[in-house]
């Protein structure tokens, strides 16, 4: 890094990406296709149209076009908060006394406070263009629901959100923001759907999970006229939209001749990590670069590090197509003591295939260590990170300390997906020493894995 490199690198508005990057077009081996649970055959466009917008279905199934144009109506929305800054964590480097250079791509500079707005804007735009009048979705920690509520308000489309119950209790202000934008918010599991009533009958005290909320949102979408379901992570088209993160990051680094050695992102369903690494991974697959990619996930929901690579349902109610992914089993419900998001039982099929083929690594972290990293980052860099992002921060700190111990100078890049201002109850518990750590036992996981056997 030269002395004249600024701590914050802002691309000009003219550099805003005009196309998304479709990593599948560069993969040597594609993810296995989604299967129709009734026929066990690969899902066709016709199978998916009753659930998703038509353009999103086309993007979901597109494996040939490396770049897909971003419509002007979406580009105009992006200009409200993009390009987002790439920041040198100089004060964190100083605190760690490391020779490493640490950079982070900051996606929290919008009202939703996270990267989720990148795909929310796209999905609502296509719904509006198709003439749909309402959408349904799920949300875990609330970032996706907030982002979608913003986009629905902008494009004037009605929205109902099923929010994981424990998150709605821990993050009431997220619910208030969604409702301010006009969304209807229901804690999940609820008694408003057949799926919710069934889950409550089996688990009456559950704090819920994304799998539960997805089941309720899907059921509502299928029973509501002129309505479709939209998802904030996992699926191919969501990672496609999030590639604006990686495209901007790569352009900003190239402005100053910076080349990362290690690229890190938190991983729940995989949207922000997949978006960040997309153009860099294409270079690795082509043999042009040898970046090291690390996905950081919670020990309480360790899809990569302790999951099975198998076909599984995407929701607890078993209504979705079957997805080949690293999964803890669709019946797995994370512990309610987990204070952040990243509560999904599975992982993006794209990332799952890359992990299986050895292109990326994964690490899991207990939440006390994650919040230690978050607090240190906030004190050094002045930004209170979302607990989800703090998993990536923890991983970056570990890599920077390794550089200090070995004397090796590396460039570390991570994604700061959002701010933690809606997570103050979790920070309050952390400050009072009330946060507890939990990881599922092997026996707990075996119960969920047992249900996978019938799907083989």
Image: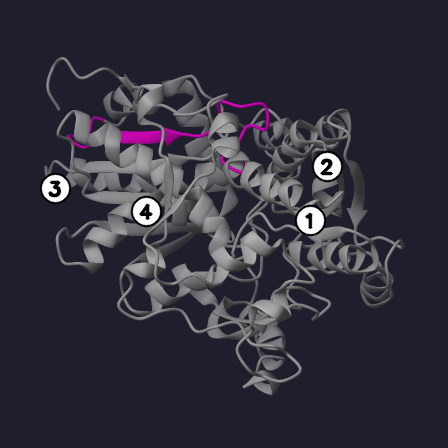
**Which quarter of the figure has residue 98?**
top left
Name above or below for residue 319 compared with residue 116: below
Name which of mark 1 and mark 4 comes first in the sequence.
1
Residue 327, given in percent of the width and then of the height, sits at: 52, 67
Question: Which label belongs to residue 157?
Answer: 2
Q: How far apart are marks 2 and 3 (CA)?
A: 54 Å
Which residue is most to the right? Answer: 191
Q: Give the range drawn in magenta.
A: 97-116
Residue named by callout 3: 406
Q: Is residue 269 above or below residue 394?
A: below
Q: Main secondary structure of the magenta part?
A: loop
Residue drawn at x 68%, y 50% as measured from the top left:
336
Identify the secondary structure beneath mark 1: strand
The answer to whether residue 404 is left or right of residue 111 is: left
Residue 422, position as x, y percentages in the image:
63, 28
Dot 2 lies on which element?
Answer: loop
Circle 4 residue: 277
Q: Which of marks 3 and 1 is in front?
A: 1
> Is residue 129 or residue 330 the one in the foreground?
129
**Secondary-structure class at tag 4:** helix
| Residue 102 painted magenta | yes
1 or 2: mark nearer the eye: 2
- Mark 1 and mark 2 in contact? Answer it, CB < 8 Å: no
Residue 138's disc is 1
Q: 244 left or right of 185? A: left
281 relative to 142 in the view: left or right: left
Residue contact between numbered discs 1 and 4, judged by CB atoms under 8 Å: no
Cα separation, mark 3 vs mark 4, equals: 26 Å
The reply to whether discs 2 and 3 touch (Cβ–Cβ < 8 Å) is: no
At a point 20% along the width and 52% down the height, the residue shown is: 283
């Amino acid at each position: 890094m030269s002395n004249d490199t600024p701590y914050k690198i802002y691309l000009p508005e003219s550099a805003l990406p005009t196309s998304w990057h479709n990593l599948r077009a560069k993969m040597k081996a594609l993810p296995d296709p989604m299967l129709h649970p009734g026929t066990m055959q690969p899902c066709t466009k016709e199978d998916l149209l009753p659930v998703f917008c038509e353009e999103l279905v086309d993007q979901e199934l597109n494996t040939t076009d490396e770049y897909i144009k971003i419509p002007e109506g979406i580009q105009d929305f992006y200009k409200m908060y993009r390009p987002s800054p790439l920041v040198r964590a100089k004060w964190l480097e100083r605190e760690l006394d490391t020779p490493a250079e640490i950079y982070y791509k900051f996606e929290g500079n919008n009202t939703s406070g996270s990267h989720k707005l990148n795909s929310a804007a796209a999905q609502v735009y296509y719904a509006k263009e198709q003439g749909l009048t309402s959408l349904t979705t799920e949300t875990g920690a609330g970032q996706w629901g907030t982002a979608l509520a913003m986009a629905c308000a902008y494009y004037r489309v009605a929205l109902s959100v099923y929010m994981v119950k424990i998150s709605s209790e821990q993050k009431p202000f997220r619910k208030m923001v969604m409702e301010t934008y006009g969304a209807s918010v229901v804690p999940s599991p609820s008694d408003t759907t057949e799926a919710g009533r069934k889950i409550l009958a089996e688990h009456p005290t559950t704090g819920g999970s994304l799998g539960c909320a997805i089941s309720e949102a899907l059921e509502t979408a299928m029973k509501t006229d002129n309505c479709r379901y939209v998802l904030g992570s996992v699926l191919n088209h969501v990672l496609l939209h999030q590639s604006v993160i990686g495209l901007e990051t790569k352009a900003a680094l190239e402005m100053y001749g910076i080349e990362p050695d290690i690229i890190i992102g938190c991983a729940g369903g995989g949207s922000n990590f997949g978006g960040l690494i997309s153009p860099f991974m294409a270079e690795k697959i082509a043999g042009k670069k040898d970046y090291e990619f690390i996905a950081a996930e919670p020990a309480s929901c360790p899809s990569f590090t302790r999951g099975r690579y198998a076909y599984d349902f995407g929701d607890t109610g078993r209504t979705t197509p079957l997805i080949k992914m690293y999964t803890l089993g669709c019946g797995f419900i994370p512990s309610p003591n987990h204070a952040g998001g990243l509560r999904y039982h599975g992982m993006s099929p794209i990332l799952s295939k890359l992990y299986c083929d050895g292109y990326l690594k994964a690490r899991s972290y207990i939440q006390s260590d994650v919040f230690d990293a978050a607090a240190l980052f906030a004190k050094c860099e002045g930004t209170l990170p979302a607990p989800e992002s703090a998993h990536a921060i923890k991983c970056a700190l570990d890599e920077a300390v390794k550089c200090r111990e070995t004397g090796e100078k590396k460039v570390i890049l991570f994604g700061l997906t959002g701010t933690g201002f809606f997570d103050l109850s979790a920070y309050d518990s952390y400050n009072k020493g009330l946060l507890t750590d939990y990881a599922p036992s092997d026996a707990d996981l075996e119960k969920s894995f047992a249900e996978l056997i019938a799907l083989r």
